[in-house]
Image: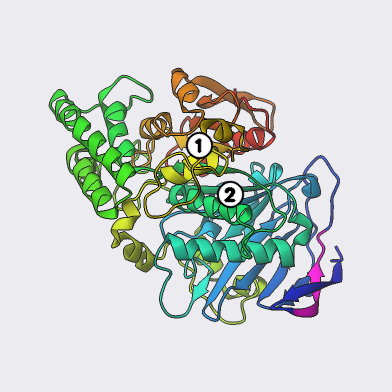
Amino acid sequence: MVSLVATVVLLFAGVQLSVPMLIPSRPGHQVPIRIESSSYSSLASASGPGWMVHEQDEHTCDAGSRNFAGRVNISDTKSMFFWFFESRQRPNERPVTVWLNGGPGASSTSGMYGEVGPCTINKDHDGTVFSEYSWTNHSNLLIIDQPAGVGLSTVRGALPAGLLEASADFEATLKVILENILPQYASNPLYIAGESYGGQYVPYFAADIVRHQKESSPHRLLNTPLAGIILVNALVDNSWLSLGQYELFCTDNEPNVLRFNETVCDAMAAAAPECERLGALCRTSDDPYICLAAAEFCMENLDIYFQAEVDALRRSPYDFRRDCPDPPLCGVGDNGMGSTEKFLNRPEIQTRLGFDSPVNFIPINFDMNTLWASNPAIFLPATKYLTYLLDGGNRLHSFGARNVGGEHSNASVAAAASVPVLVINGEYDVGCNAPGTLLTYDHLPWHGQAAFRATRSLDPWYWTDVNGQVHKGGLWKGAASGTLAIATVHDAGHMAPGDQRGAVAALFGRWIAGSGSLG
């Protein structure tokens, strides 16, 4: 396939520049199109002030659609790696979904191969395999390794130290990609999805995007509407997740695989009121040290019992059906795929991705993880940002030191355009467990809280595989407005999109299509 390269005029730092711009093709087909193999030299590439991008082929990802990997230099010391995949169907009509893995310090490129992307890595770690079940069946997909220093994104000097810096870097990266590199997608609806610690990244980043657009900030995304956020097995509020372990291990509620004895359950029940009280104090004070104290109490009096199972190598905190022979990372990514680390450190792969010199790719930057974990701010809940988004960028509740909106009446909040939220949870995750997640959103203050919490029962949702077989995917409940929906995923742990690729991809597609109901 011959690539199309056009010339456009960009404004950068007040100087008018003429640079090459990639114009991806526009397949109008209703079924995935497989790109034929082409020589590396014939693939498109382009560069501009502070950015470069290279078209990819099946050597780096057998994607079934055109895709482009590149880097954005957001400062003299930070270079952000991204990978953009066109949707397999009508990409010009489809939204753009950003995928972020958590950590902090986990590479989103690993999540692309292992969970949501259009290809996986073969068992020999030297090639890729087309994936039938990809989020690109429904949306354009943008992968960003962030913060700087994670995955294939690089930093010279100090690592980013927290969400404030990471959010500014994320928005700057997104702005260059959508306004300079791929402006044909700048006005498409934008979704931001995150997993695990992505429950902190995504609400914070999304709230900043909305706030900057409302304030007409020079840093804002000019023409990109934020259509919603997606939180997958997400860490939003530590205290509710600790409290959720009682329901997970001391009741007959599904999945009811592991049951603690009566003595342990009595001790957990006795500690629950104080954990809940401290969690509420954390949320109202927005004080990192109060939140640290709350997390310590809840962990020492509720989480400790399952942690004993992990320490004994019997159970994984990411999927408690599995053992944990090598903690702390056990029971995740066990999907028969080859190693992302081995594949992405192959010199020929890095060359195709546009690197002139080797980059040491590691799936998780533990130095960054340790740095962020040493700051009590890591225990602050993200609930205030979710309230802000669900209330359409208006603020009814105290946000502590970081005010992200002004005071408004109930009527004005109800009339504001909410940013919809989809929450997905694998049923066998412990650290970000489904009962605790349901508690989080039942207690989340927003204008639709009363009606959402009043919906007690969860209904089944279904999906259809490529052979036409219908499967029960899990359970769900949602606000009548479609603004907030929570879905559990059967037979899945912490990495639900990887454990159940077909089910979660179908759920994602149904939600962004705007059907309102997931059933």
Image coordinates for residue 312, horizontal then vertical, percent: 20, 45
Q: Residues within 10 Å of mark 1 (few under 14, many from 20)?
A: many
Secondary structure beneath label 2: strand
The answer to whether 229 appears left or right of 372 in the picture is right
Q: CA distance from mark 2 to mark 1?
A: 12 Å
Q: Which residue is mark 2?
A: 192
Give percent across and percent down for residue 48: 73, 77
The foreground one among 40 and 201 is 201
Q: Amino acid at mark 2?
A: Ile
Give the x, y percent position of residue 469: 65, 25
Q: Which residue is mark 1?
A: 423
The quadrant where residue 284 appears: top left
Q: Looking at the magenta stretch, what is its main secondary structure?
A: strand
Residue 361 visible in this rendered orientation of the protein: yes
Query: Magenta segment range?
Result: 15-24
Camera-nearest residue between 8 and 302: 8
Residue 130: horizontal and vertical position, in percent?
A: 67, 50
Whether residue 376 sits left or right of residue 148 in the image: it is: left
Tell me the kind of residue under disc 1. Answer: Val
User: For this view, does 259 lie left or right of residue 40?
Assistant: left
Residue drawn at x 42%, y 54% is 402
**Depicted 62 relative to depicted 180: above or below:** above
